[in-house]
Structure formats: C-alpha cells, structure tokens
Amino acid sequence: MEIDVYENYGRFYDEFTIGMTFKHWPGKTITQWDNHNFCMITMNNSPLHLDVEYMKNHKHKKPIVVGLLTLSLIVGMTVQDLSGKAIANLGYEEVKHDGPVFEGDTVYATSKVLDMRESKSNPKAGIVKIETLGYNQNNEKILTLRRNIYIPKKK
C-alpha cells in the first residue's frame, strides 16, 4: 500500500473559494539565534538587529528581528494550508511591517482568499490572491502581505 504524504499538503485551485479564511498553526517563537543567524546568512550587520548595547538608547530598547525573517517565517507558516501544491508564487503585491518583532516573540498568521481567476496561459491552473496577516503573542498585528499564488487545478 502506497501512502501519499502530500495528499493534505496545500490545496488545488478548485479547493479555494473567495472569502475562505485560514488560521495557520503552529506559531514560531523567534530566538536570538534565529535573528542572529538570519543576519549572518543575509549579510545584514545592522546594530538594530545585533547590538544590545546600541539598542539601549534606541526607541525600542532592544534588538529588532530582521523584517525579512519575519516575512519568511509567516509565509512559511502558510505553505501547508495555501501553497503546498503551488506551481509558483507569482509575486508579492504588498508587504507592510505593521509593528516591531523582538527576540522571544511568537508569531502567528491568518490568511484570507481575496480573489481568484483562471490562468490565461494554462487551462489546468489558476491564480489565487491571498492576504496574510501576522500577529505576535499579544495579538498585535505585525505584518500584512498580499500575494498571488499560481496553483494547479485538481480536475
């Protein structure tokens, strides 16, 4: 007996409807290691993200997690529900950092289907427009993003 481990991973275009909402789980607690490692692999050495002493005199008083790490984690949290079967992410129309994220914060995400259309070039696929909101453990909005996902049809 063969088991399809990807059967419930993502959705086909036909399985989405406009207005459909998702609460992505689990969340992710961002550690100092996560933030510092991301800074190093992306060559971002800004003291805003790495220097505790420098940040003591800053408005936030402590290092801020790199925005692209926050974006990457939140997009990653959506894959199982949204884009696991995707052909491609076509683009991010809007990314807004609504609030700071700090080491030790736990991030969560929700998504809503805003629009759908069949592909003009591929009758076996469609494009789903999604808005994803990121929140911290205090339910404060930290990120808003909109993207278009190119997804195959099931039929």
Image: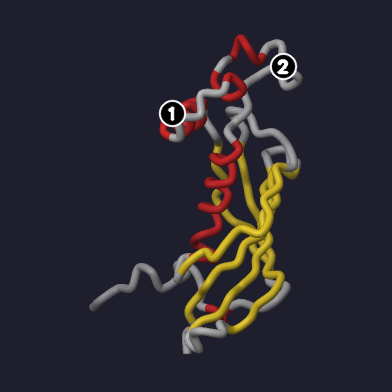
Q: Name the residue located 47 percent from the left edge and 86 percent from the top edge.
A: 124
88 or 61: nearer the eye?
88
Give percent across and percent down for residue 155: 47, 90
Q: Find the distance from the CA under tag 1 to the CA under tag 2.
A: 22 Å
124 or 26: nearer the eye?
124
Say few, some or many: other residues with alpha carbon within 10 Å of mark 1 (under 14 / 14 to 19 / 20 or more).
few
At label 1, the amino acid type is Met
Above or below, 138 relative to 55: below
The secondary structure type at the circle numbered 1 is helix
Q: Which mark is residue 24?
A: none
Q: Which mark is residue 40?
A: 1
Q: Name the residue located 65 percent from the left edge and 69 percent from the top edge.
A: 129
At label 2, the amino acid type is His
Q: Which residue is mark 2?
A: 58
Say few, some or many: other residues with alpha carbon within 10 Å of mark 2 (under 14 / 14 to 19 / 20 or more).
few
Q: Name the residue located 50 percent from the left edge and 60 percent from the top edge.
A: 79
